[in-house]
């Protein structure tokens, strides 16, 4: 820390003096100001390593500051925001835009000192800035240390500004929608709409109307003309989640839109021109769906202009610690907890877990652990995994509800297969209860069963 520069933006003179003394005692060269109108200019000229800013300072808005720094391609220092009015959505937005921490006033000196040290450690411990950094653009932050993920992000950044369709494949919970938003925000369309629709969530007749719109009187209940998602996404991006679940009839209509760049509303007589970039995702093997005649081959190749295949969390073990720390900070802010991190034993439990639900499952585990932790460090018992399963999953003798079969033998795939079918046996085929035991969604369970035939 000696020789490093810290920029302090605090209006209150007493607080400004207290914080200045604290940071100078830590070895920083401190530049302290009572208002923030010139913050961005200071960033460019002085290049401080840390910014600590009170969001209530005149002339300063934390969110605007972070956005402007990203838009100006300015290297953002480790930024810690102090606020008197905690709002959950706002806190999450600040973190998404690049803030390292978000502290509720009054902030005690020890808490602030730890926050600064932790923020700096996140950079200083990284052996390679190119490999270890998070990739952030505007509201999208993809946190990873994995080389495969970094290669995917580089590819996504190169093609983001094209109009080419993208097909993102990966298991449920890997972050496919996050990649879609990353592509949108890195493109020239970033100021235009990003419209999302889940193709598996609606029956065929409703999905057709939602996608392409309808005219008044086109069907029973069509009381007025309605623009579809394609029209709403005009000049922007349309995100089609779970595209392989779309019925064949709609697949052919979608193909025509991609080829001709026009949509036909249900009951309409005149085509409507649209300029839309389509990003589609699937948690299935799209080529296998084509081979099984469940998905049109011509549509597959039209969408698969740019293929992105996201690896599951179990194949990028290095990200588990990084993501866990991020989620710990996130839920400590949201739920007003003071958890600092994971014990080595808790981290080992996570490293040995297969994560069928991927990053989404890890986030849920960490959120639960933050709420249950009785100390500043999360222990294996706080995770409620393995031998520490919730009481509801134990029988009267204390044995795990999935039985005492050795699931450690064989491949991860075999272990997953055994656990799924043991859960189904235990619940007499009830998929909802089986999914709850396994800690995954019913949709993920359904996809796994389709995979296993």
Image (cartoon, helix red, strand yellow):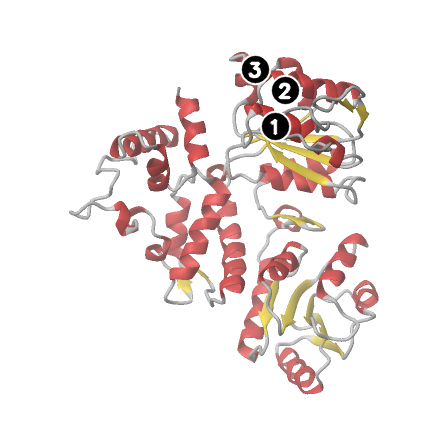
Q: Which residue is mark 1?
A: 207
Residue 416, percent across and down?
36, 32
Decide if residue 172 is on the left or right side of residue 29. left
- The image quadrant where one finds the N terminus is bottom right
Decide if residue 326 is on the left or right side of residue 253. left
Image quarter for residue 406?
A: top left
> Gap between marks 3 and 1, in whole Å?
21 Å
Decide if residue 237 is on the left or right side of residue 351. right
Q: Which residue is mark 3?
A: 290
Image quarter for residue 13?
A: bottom right
Q: Secondary structure at mark 3?
A: helix
Residue shown at 70% from the left, 83% from the top: 12
Identity of the residue furthest to the bottom in this view: 14
> Gap between marks 3 and 2, in whole Å?
15 Å
Circle number at residue 250 = 2
> Gap between marks 2 and 1, in whole Å?
8 Å
Residue 405, percent across and down?
23, 35
Q: Earlier in the sequence, mark 3 or mark 1?
A: 1
Decide if residue 282 is on the left or right side of residue 45. left
């Amino acid at each position: 820390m000696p020789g490093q520069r810290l920029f302090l933006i605090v209006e209150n003179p007493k607080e400004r003096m207290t914080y200045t003394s604290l940071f100078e005692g830590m070895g920083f060269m401190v530049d302290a100001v009572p208002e923030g109108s010139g913050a961005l200019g200071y960033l460019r000229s002085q290049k401080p390593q840390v910014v600590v800013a009170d969001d209530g300072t005149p002339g300063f808005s934390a969110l605007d500051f972070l956005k402007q720094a990203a838009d100006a391609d300015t290297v953002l220092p480790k930024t810690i925001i102090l606020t008197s009015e905690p709002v959950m959505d706002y806190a999450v937005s600040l973190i998404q835009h690049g803030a390292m921490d978000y502290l509720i006033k009054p902030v005690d000196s020890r808490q602030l000192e730890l926050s600064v040290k932790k923020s700096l450690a996140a950079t200083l411990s990284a052996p390679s800035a190119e490999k270890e950094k998070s990739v952030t653009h505007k509201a999208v932050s993809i946190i990873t240390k994995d080389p495969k993920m970094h290669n995917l992000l580089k590819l996504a950044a190169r093609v983001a500004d094209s109009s080419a369709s993208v097909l993102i494949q990966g298991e449920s919970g890997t972050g496919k929608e996050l990649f879609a938003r990353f592509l949108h925000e890195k493109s020239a369309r970033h100021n235009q709409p990003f419209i999302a629709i889940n193709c598996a969530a609606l029956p065929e007749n409703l999905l057709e109307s939602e996608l392409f719109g309808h005219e008044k009187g086109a069907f029973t209940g069509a009381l007025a003309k309605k623009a579809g998602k394609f029209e709403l996404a005009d000049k922007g991006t349309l995100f089609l989640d779970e595209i392989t679940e779309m019925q064949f009839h709609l697949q052919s209509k979608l193909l025509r839109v991609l080829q001709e760049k026009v949509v036909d509303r249900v009951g309409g007589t005149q085509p409507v021109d649209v300029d839309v970039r389509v990003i589609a995702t699937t948690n299935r093997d799209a080529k296998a769906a084509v081979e099984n005649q469940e998905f049109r081959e011509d549509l597959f190749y039209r969408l698969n202009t740019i293929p992105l295949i996201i690896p599951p969390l179990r194949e990028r073990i290095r990200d588990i610690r990084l993501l866990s720390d991020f989620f710990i900070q996130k839920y400590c802010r949201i739920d007003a907890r003071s958890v600092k991190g994971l014990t080595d034993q808790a981290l080992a439990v996570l490293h040995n877990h297969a994560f069928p639900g991927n990053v989404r499952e890890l986030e849920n585990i960490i959120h639960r652990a933050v709420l249950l932790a009785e100390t500043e460090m999360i222990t294996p018992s706080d995770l409620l995994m393995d031998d520490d399963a919730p009481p509801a999953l134990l029988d009267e003798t204390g044995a795990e509800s999935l039985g005492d079969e050795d699931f450690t033998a064989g491949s991860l795939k075999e272990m997953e297969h055994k656990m799924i079918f043991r859960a189904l046996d235990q619940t007499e085929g009830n998929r909802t209860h089986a999914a709850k035991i396994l800690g995954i969604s019913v949709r993920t369970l359904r996809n796994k069963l389709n995979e296993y035939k």
